[in-house]
Every structure is written in C-alpha cells, then in structure tokens.
Amino acid sequence: MARYNDAKCRLCRREGMKLFLKGARCFTDRCAIERRNYPPGQHGLNRGKLTPYGIQLREKQKAKRIYGVLESQFRRYFQWAEGQKGVTGENLLRLLETRLDNVVFRLGFAASRRESRQMVAHGHFQVNGRKAAIPSFLVKVGDAVQLRPTSKLAPRVDDNLNAGRGQVPAWLELDAGARRGVVRSLPLREDIQIPVTEQLIVELYSK
C-alpha cells in the first residue's frame, strides 16, 4: 500500500497552515508551524508570489495531504465526483469524508487521520458487525462503525475520546461508551470543516 513516509510537519509548513497530521503534537508549541512558519527547504523564506496555476495546485495538494491520499487515488475520486449528480467539488469532498479512516477520525477514535488509517488497516474496526481493514472503504448512510470487541486498542481509543479534540460532525452519531458510531446522513458542504476551496481543484483538473 503506497503512502507518504517522509516528515509530516514539512507538509504543514509547505501549505502554511496546520493540517493536523501529527495528532496531539499539533495542539502544542512543538508544532512546526508554531516554530518555523515558512516553507521548508533552502529557499523557503524567499519563495515568490504564486501564479493562478500555483494557487490551484496548492489547494489540490492541501486536500490530498489532509486526507492522506496519493495523486492517482485522488484523481480517481475526482473522476467519480465528476460522474455524480450535483456540484463536482462538493461531491469530491463528500467522497473523501466518507472514507472509513476519515470516519474513524471524525468520531474521535483516533488523534489523527494517519493514526486512524493504521488502526483500520490493522483490523481494529468493524462496519455493521463485520471486520473492515480497508482505510479507503466508503461508508453509507446507516452504516455502524465500531471498535472490535477483541481489539487491544480500547485504552488508546478511550484516551482519544476523552481528549475531546474536536466535535463530532452532525452527519455522524457517536456512542462513546460502546465505542460505536453511526452514519446518520451524507455530509453537506457546511459539515466539512477543512480549509480547502474545492472549486480551484475542479478548475485545475478541468484544464
């Protein structure tokens, strides 16, 4: 399974904002954005003004990095979004939001999407009572996502839930005691709180 293995904090610095890729560390003064709020590399402090194409590219890169997907997979999501009814940009974000690893993160079971992806890949969660070990699995309305009863990660999940780093979005319902969440509806654009202008991504891929 392909994935990005280099320093995660460089990605936040390149986009000039916190992408919350490192979990609890992002909420402390050890966060790279707090210490070095400029792009990485030798010429990080001397980068020029972005072109219109550069602005569109940065939005696409930002979305990819937030959700932890690589280029080929991201392009497939865009093609699926294009083929659906409605606004392509919103369809794209909705597909990314309904990935199983993102749902686990949104429910508060994991401190970051990176951690949730690892939890899912190692088989610690089940969907509708059946083991699900594919992070890119797309949940549907009515699906129940739950920590497996035999999982040894229960203390870690409880710690993440008790940390209360984010509010569970309206399209999900959480039963913290049972370590279980239910997909109540598909997310609307106002439910997807990420700093991305999806129309710029559509314009980039439409060229």
Image: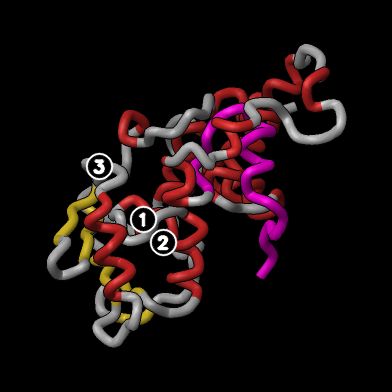
Q: Is residue 170 left or right of residue 81?
A: left
- Whichever of labels 3 and 2 marks the residue nearer the N terminus, that label is 2
Residue 15 part of the magenta-drawn span: yes
Please say if the residues under marks 1 and 2 sit with CB atoms less than 8 Å apart.
yes
The mark lying in front, picked from 3 and 2, is 3
Element under disc 3: loop
Residue type highlighted by circle 2: Leu
Q: Main secondary structure of the magenta part?
A: loop
Residue at x-position 48% and y-position 78%:
122
Residue 46, position in %: x, y?
82, 18
Residue 167: numbered disc: 3
Q: Is residue 92 visible?
A: no
Residue 202 part of the magenta-drawn span: no
Instruction: Name the residue tied to disc 2.
Output: 100
63 to 70, vertically: above or below? above
Residue 167, position in %: x, y?
25, 42
Cα–Cα span, label 1 and label 3:
13 Å
Residue type highlighted by circle 1: Val
Residue 20: numbered disc: none
Residue type highlighted by circle 3: Gln
Q: Nearer the viewer, residue 49 or 61?
A: 49
Which contiguous range is marked in magenta?
1-21
